[in-house]
Amino acid sequence: DIVMTQSPDSLAVSLGERATINCKSSQSVLYSSNNKNYLAWYQQKPGQPPKLLISWASTRESGVPDRFSGSGSGTDFTLTISSLQAEDVAVYYCQQYYSSPPQYTFGQGTKLDIK
Amino acid sequence: QVQLVESGGGLVKPGGSLRLSCAASGFTFSDYYMSWIRQAPGKGLEWISYISSSSTYTNYVDSVKGRFTISRDNAKSSLYLQMNSLRAEDTAVYYCASSPMAAAPFDYWGQGALVIVSS
């Protein structure tokens, strides 16, 4: 199974500042035939289900503010919030969907708070 | 708009059984792969099972293999999870989620159904 490891486990950032969350996979999730990274980022607010923010490592979903961006390739990925807003307080998860047959795995989550 | 609504959660004794349902609307259910994902209290997300659009393929995480069975009824736009031989560690909120194909992220999620396994 592909193990996803996020860092840090928790993070506190001042409003308007940059927040960076890292995700590392135990093996590459880059599919060479199409040069796509099979990596997604989700945001989960208290009492709510997760919401898909970014797919294919860097493609923002419709309606997601452009302060959210994803980067990385292969085994190392980053979610960046360029200017933290109060509504961004949440737990963020990375997830790989590379495995075949599907054995989807999530990172352990990163809790983001306001400093 | 897309809606996924889980039902069937509740309190069950260890060794007992429960069947979760997920009613889908607002999209062509039969075109989508579906999964069950759970979240133990205060913990992270764990994918537990998926089923292909026509039910041809299924897969499970090792911890539920042989105990849980995923199924779907495309005519009723519904997804199911039959859970047998339940254990305390199965206590969690269970979400159903959709993806347009096997190798794709989960684009829509239900609100979740709480399953508590306790004597």
Image (spheres, coloured by chain):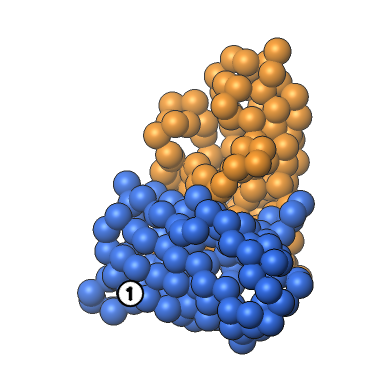
Chain colours: A blue, B orange
> Looking at the picture, how far across and down is residue A55, in whole percent?
49, 73
> To which residue does mark 1 refer?
A73
Q: Say whether residue A7 is left or right of residue B23.
A: left
Q: Quadrant of residue A77?
A: bottom left
Is the residue marked by circle 1 packed among few (<14), some (14-19), or many (20+) residues within 10 Å?
some
State the SS at label 1: strand
* Residue occupying image coordinates x 56% and y 48%: B45
- What count of labels does the image hold? 1
* Residue occupying image coordinates x 60% and y 22%: B88
Say above or below: B82 vs A101. above
* Residue occupying image coordinates x 29% and y 70%: A74
* Residue occupying image coordinates x 64% and y 70%: A13
Residue A24 visible to an observer of this rendering = yes
Say above or below: B11 vs B4. above
> Looking at the picture, how far across and down is residue A43, in whole percent?
63, 64
Question: Where is the C terminus of chain B found, in terms of image quarters?
Answer: top right
Question: As drawn, which residue projects farthest toward the left?
Answer: A32
* Residue type indicated by callout 1: Ser
Residue B56 visible to an observer of this rendering = no
Q: Say whether residue A55 is left or right of residue A89.
A: left
> B108 or B52, which lies in front?
B108
> Looking at the picture, how far across and down is residue B25, in whole percent?
72, 61
Say above or below: B99 vs A1. below
Question: Where is the N terminus of chain B found, in terms of image quarters?
Answer: bottom right
Dot 1 falls on which chain? A
> Looking at the picture, how far across and down is residue A101, in whole percent?
33, 51
